[in-house]
Each structure stands twice: as structure tokens, then as C-alpha cells.
Image (cartoon, helix red, strand yellow):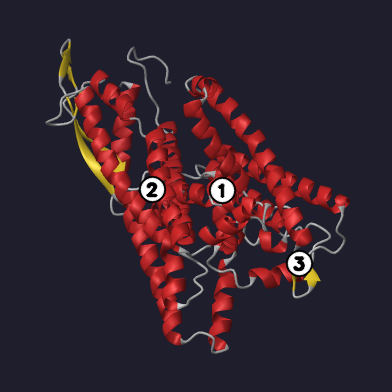
């Protein structure tokens, strides 16, 4: 029997045997030893995330952490609170991982924008894996440079700040600045290395999982803080129920939208080669409503650091005062810029990942077409139109989730610590990681099924 036809037959038998079975039942049905590789990947991912959490609790010496904790105590929904949540509380502790993954994200944005402008980078992006590795290397260098610049800004700001009449820095001076900047840059490089190792040798996207771990680590503190406010009569039962209801509604909405996709029908023309007829099959091209995932909110949040950085450079100048007034977290101008940037990055990232021209060309080469649409340029135009509409819907959905905490804070006077952006990242990353785990588990099941099958050659010789 032909090995390819045997593989197809094995896959069909597997699908029939798994109908109506849950995930636990499917795992139980796997032959012994087939999940060892997947278990190693999961344990590797969890181990490196644990290393990241250890780094979050290593403070940089010379800083009054109690004063910093008092400062961040009431920063629930604004920019500082959001960055502190993304870093898993590292900014509040002022640890070596205080900058988190944000410098790398900012460098990635700059690298992708320069790819369209700089001819050398554009040529590298077309050279396959070798070119992408070179661009990734430039991105790493840029992330370290941004970490050094942001480290200098943070060191200067802490050295000149005071809270309640006491300074933030215990022993200010040039030596403390040097140690602080070096520690922050080293922490950013360490987080980049962890994320890349998780992506290559673990399960899921390493950078997204690091942000996911940072947000999830703050959930117990958020619950404890909300309970204390309720116990101290600072928040009534109605507001607590409102926060709980919004969290559940946002979670359900995120799951519903993230699973939604437009199924574009694809038909393949029949062709005869000798006595065999190939093609004539029907398929679907799924286009997700939110193809960009959690990337647009993360990119937009990262870029919003620049006005804060400039404000920290010239706090008493007209430029600093204007930026402080315009980019006040929760203000109408801040929310407007945030929404525009999210929609822009939704289109920008989707245009990079979804190439309508390439898809139309591949369909034409393999004899596939969309019913009612001519192959070639017409198919590309139709795909662009569909993707643009879905991306606009997805971008507006992301923007609505991200400005939700600011609206609750201004309208109902609620410190919504675990806002729409955080829920979006947590649910989105969890869904994507489970998809990869399930796909990897299915591939292991197919391999195990085929390894247990003896295949004889057509000539009746020995088993293959």
C-alpha cells in the first residue's frame, strides 16, 4: 500500500475514533510514551517562566522600596499601573526586570517600520530565515539601547523625586546610576533570552507568555486589594459585583471574538493524469476577526512610553507641561490616541502576516479558486476587501476593551486594576498556547499511530 494513502487512512481512522471524546479521554487513549516530548516542552516553559519570576523579586540596591510601593498603591488604571502589571510587579519592586519586555517590543516596532523605509532591511526581509535572523539580531541591539536610555531616565527621575518628604534613593550618586542602568539593561537582555528560548524549545510564544505570567502573578494582589477596600467600607457590594460582572463579560466576549473567523469557500478544479482524477475538493480559508491578536494593544502601550519619557527629561519646560496635560492617563486625548494607535497597528500587523497576493497566487498555481471570483488579481482584491472589513471590526473591538478601565474609573469612580487590556492578553495568550499544545499533541498521536503500523513494499519484500 502507498505510504501516503496509508497516512491519510490513518488520519481518518483517528478522527473517527476521537469523535465525541473529551481532551482527557483523548490523552488517555494515547500510547505510552507519546507525550514525553510534549511534557518536556511544557516543563521547559514552566521552568523558564519560574526563572523570570525569580528575577522579578531581585531588587536593585539603593532604592527605598517602601516609598515606591506607596507610590504604586493607587496607580491601578493609569499608565504606571499598567506597566507595573505588565512587568508582574517588577517596576513596583524596582527589580532587575523592572523594564520587562517593553524595550524589546518598542525595538520590534521600530524594526518593522524601518523595514518598509530602509532598502537594506527590506532586502533582508525577503531573504528568508537568514534575513529574519539578521533583523532579529538588530532588534536585540536596539532593545538593549532603549533599555539603557530608559534606565538613565528612570535613574534621574528616582534620584530627583521625593514622596512624603523622603527621597526614593538611599545613596544617590554616579555609582548608583551606573549600577542601576547596567542592572536594568542586563535584566532586559535576560528576559529577551528567556522569551526566545521558550519560543524555540518550549510551547507558545515566549514574549507573550512572559507578559501573560506577569499579569497573572498580580491577580492575587488585585483580589486582596479589592477585598480590603470592601472590608474597610471603601467600596460597596454593588461596585464589587459590577467589577466581577465586567470581568466575566469581557472574558466571554474575548473568547467569542477570538474564536470567530470568516470561512471563505475554496474549490479545486478536477484534473486528470493518466487514469487518475485529482482535485475536485472543497475547502475553506479561515480568516480570523482579530488576526493581529494581542499585538496592537501591546505595541500601542509601548509607544505611549515615549511621551512619558520626554516629560521626564524636561519636566519643568513648556514641552513637558504640555505632554503631561495631553497624555494624562484616562484623559480624552490619551484615549483617542490610544484607540487610533490600536486600530493602526491592527491593520499594520495584519498586512504583514496576511499576504493576499501570495495566497491568490498559490491558489491559482494549485487550481483553487473562490466561487464567483476569478483567479489572480480579482481573488487578491476580494481577500483584501474581506480582511480589511474584519480587521476594522477587530481593531474597534480591541480599542473598546482597552479603554474600558478608563471609562469605569471616570464614570463610576472605580479603580479597575484588572482591565480589558489585561484580560485580552491573558485570554488571548491562553487560547493560542492551548491551540499549539493541542496541535502538537495531535501530531504526536499521528506519529505514534504510524510507527505502530508495518508497511510492506509493493514487490512483497521486507517490511519498511
Location of residue 343 in the rendering, given as x and y in whole percent from the top left corner: 38, 48
Location of residue 39 in the rendering, given as x and y in whole percent from the top left corner: 55, 47
Location of residue 458 in the rendering, given as x and y in whole percent from the top left corner: 32, 15
Mark 3 falls on what kind of element? helix
Location of residue 76 in the rendering, given as x and y in whole percent from the top left corner: 56, 69
Tell me the crowding category of disc 3: few under 14, some 14 to 19, or many 20 or more residues within 10 angstroms, Cα based. some
Tell me the crowding category of disc 2: few under 14, some 14 to 19, or many 20 or more residues within 10 angstroms, Cα based. many
Frontmost of labels 2 and 1 is: 2
Dot placed on the residue nearer the N-terminal end, 2 or 1: 1
Question: Which image quadrant is residue 141 in?
Answer: top right
Using the rendered image of the protein, determine whether residue 377 is visible from the camera's viewpoint. yes
Going 15% across and 29% down the picture, which residue do you hit? Answer: 373
Instruction: Find disc 2 in the rendering and name its residue.
Output: 343
- The one nearer the camera, 309 or 301, is 309
Q: How many marks?
A: 3
Going 44% across and 34% down the picture, which residue do you hit? Answer: 447
Question: Which image quadrant is residue 90 in?
Answer: bottom right
- The one nearer the camera, 23 or 88, is 88
Against 67, is 319 above or below?
A: above
Instruction: Find disc 3 in the rendering and name its residue.
Output: 65
Instruction: Find disc 1 in the rendering and name its residue.
Output: 42
Frontmost of labels 3 and 1 is: 3
Q: Residue lying farthest front?
A: 318
Cα–Cα span, label 2 and label 3: 37 Å
Mark 1 falls on what kind of element? helix
Q: Marks 1 and 2: in contact by CB < 8 Å?
A: no
Dot placed on the residue nearer the N-terminal end, 2 or 3: 3
Going 79% across and 59% down the picture, which residue do you hit? Answer: 159
Tell whether 299 sits left or right of 175.
left
Dot placed on the residue nearer the N-terminal end, 3 or 1: 1
Cα–Cα span, label 2 and label 1: 34 Å
Amino acid at each position: 500500500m502507498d505510504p501516503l494513502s496509508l497516512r491519510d487512512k490513518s488520519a481518518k481512522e483517528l478522527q473517527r475514533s476521537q469523535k465525541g471524546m473529551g481532551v482527557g479521554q483523548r490523552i488517555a487513549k494515547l500510547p505510552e510514551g507519546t507525550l514525553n516530548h510534549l511534557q518536556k516542552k511544557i516543563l521547559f516553559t514552566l521552568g523558564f517562566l519560574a526563572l523570570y519570576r525569580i528575577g522579578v523579586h531581585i531588587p536593585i540596591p539603593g532604592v527605598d522600596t517602601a516609598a515606591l510601593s506607596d507610590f504604586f498603591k493607587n496607580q491601578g488604571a493609569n499608565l504606571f499601573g499598567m506597566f507595573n502589571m505588565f512587568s508582574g510587579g517588577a517596576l513596583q519592586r524596582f527589580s532587575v526586570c523592572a523594564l520587562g519586555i517593553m524595550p524589546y517590543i518598542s525595538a520590534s516596532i521600530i524594526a518593522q517600520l524601518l523595514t518598509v523605509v530602509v532598502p537594506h532591511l527590506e532586502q533582508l526581509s525577503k531573504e528568508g530565515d537568514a534575513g529574519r535572523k539578521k533583523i532579529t539580531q538588530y532588534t536585540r541591539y536596539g532593545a538593549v539601547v532603549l533599555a539603557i536610555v530608559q534606565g538613565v531616565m528612570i535613574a534621574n527621575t528616582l534620584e530627583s523625586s521625593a514622596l512624603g518628604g523622603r527621597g526614593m534613593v538611599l545613596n544617590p550618586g554616579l555609582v548608583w546610576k551606573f549600577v542601576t542602568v547596567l542592572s536594568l539593561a542586563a535584566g532586559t537582555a535576560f528576559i529577551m533570552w528567556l522569551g526566545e528560548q521558550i519560543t524555540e524549545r518550549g510551547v507558545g510564544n515566549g514574549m507573550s507568555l512572559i507578559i501573560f505570567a506577569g499579569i497573572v502573578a498580580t491577580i492575587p494582589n488585585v483580589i486582596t486589594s479589592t477585598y480590603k477596600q470592601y472590608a474597610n467600607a471603601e467600596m460597596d457590594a454593588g461596585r464589587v459585583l459590577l467589577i466581577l460582572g465586567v470581568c466575566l463579560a469581557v472574558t466571554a466576549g474575548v473568547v467569542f471574538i477570538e474564536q470567530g473567523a470568516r470561512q471563505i469557500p475554496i474549490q479545486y478544479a478536477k484534473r486528470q493524469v493518466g487514469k487518475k482524477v485529482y482535485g475536485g475538493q472543497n475547502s475553506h480559508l479561515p480568516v480570523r476577526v482579530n488576526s493581529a491578536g494581542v499585538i496592537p494593544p501591546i505595541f500601542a502601550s509601548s509607544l505611549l512610553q515615549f511621551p512619558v519619557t520626554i516629560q521626564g527629561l524636561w519636566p519643568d519646560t513648556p514641552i513637558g507641561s504640555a505632554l503631561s496635560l495631553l497624555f494624562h492617563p484616562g484623559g480624552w486625548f490619551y484615549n483617542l490616541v490610544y484607540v487610533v494607535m490600536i486600530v493602526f497597528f491592527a491593520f499594520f500587523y495584519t498586512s504583514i502576516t496576511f499576504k493576499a497576493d501570495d495566497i491568490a497566487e498559490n491558489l491559482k498555481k494549485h487550481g483553487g479558486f473562490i466561487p464567483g471570483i476569478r483567479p489572480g488579481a480579482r481573488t487578491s482584491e476580494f481577500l483584501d476587501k474581506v480582511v480589511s472589513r474584519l480587521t476594522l471590526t477587530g481593531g474597534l473591538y480591541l480599542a473598546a476593551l482597552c479603554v474600558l478601565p478608563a471609562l469605569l474609573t471616570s464614570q463610576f469612580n472605580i479603580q479597575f486594576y484588572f482591565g480589558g487590556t489585561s484580560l485580552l492578553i491573558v485570554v488571548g495568550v491562553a487560547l493560542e498556547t492551548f491551540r499549539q499544545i493541542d496541535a502538537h499533541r495531535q501530531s504526536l498521536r499521528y506519529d505514534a499511530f504510524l510507527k505502530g503500523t508495518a508497511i510492506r513494499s509493493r514487490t512483497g519484500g521486507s517490511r519498511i
